[in-house]
Image (cartoon, rainbow, N blue to C red):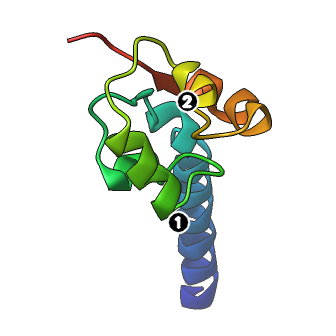
Amino acid sequence: MIVLALIVLVTASVTAVNIWWLNQPTVEAHRSQVDINTATLGELTTLLEIDLSTAERVISERPYTGKDDLVQKHIISQTTYDEIKDQIVAMQQ
C-alpha cells in the first residue's frame, strides 16, 4: 500500500513538472529587439551570425539612421542582415 502511494505521488509530481515546463515562455518570447545604436557587446553577440569582432565594428561605426546601415556601411552581409533584421532596431536619440 505504501509503495502504491509513493508511485502515485511520484507520477503526480512528474506530471506537474511536465505541465509547468510546457507552459513556460520560449527564449524567443523573452527576447526583445536589440538597438544597434545603444547595445552592448554582449547584447550584440546574442544575435545570430554576430561574433565579437563584428559586434565591435557595429559599435565603432555608430550612429545608425536605420538598421540597414549595417549593410550600407559593409559591416555585415545582406544574407546576415536578412537573418537578423527582425531582431534589431536603430533608435534615434
The secondary element bearing badge 1 is classed as: helix
Where does label 1 land, which residue?
13
Placement of 48 over or under 82, stated as above or below: below
Residue 33 image-quadrant placement: top left
| Distance between mark 2 and mark 1 Cα atoms | 55 Å
Label 1 Cα neighbours within 10 Å, binned few <14 / some 14-19 / many ≥20: few
Picture coordinates of residue 24, whole percent (x, y): 51, 43
Where does label 2 land, which residue?
73
Front residue of 53 and 6: 53
Residue 81 visible at all: yes
Relative placement, left or right, of 87 versus 90 is: right
Q: Amino acid at mark 1?
A: Ser
Q: Amino acid at mark 2?
A: Lys
Residue drawn at (47%, 62%), measured in percent from left and top?
52
Front residue of 14 and 5: 14
Residue drawn at (53%, 21%), measured in percent from left and top?
69
Q: Quadrant of the N terminus?
A: bottom right
Residue 26 visible at all: no
Picture coordinates of residue 77, whole percent (x, y): 72, 38
Q: Quadrant of the C terminus?
A: top left
Relative placement, left or right, of 88 versus 71 is: left
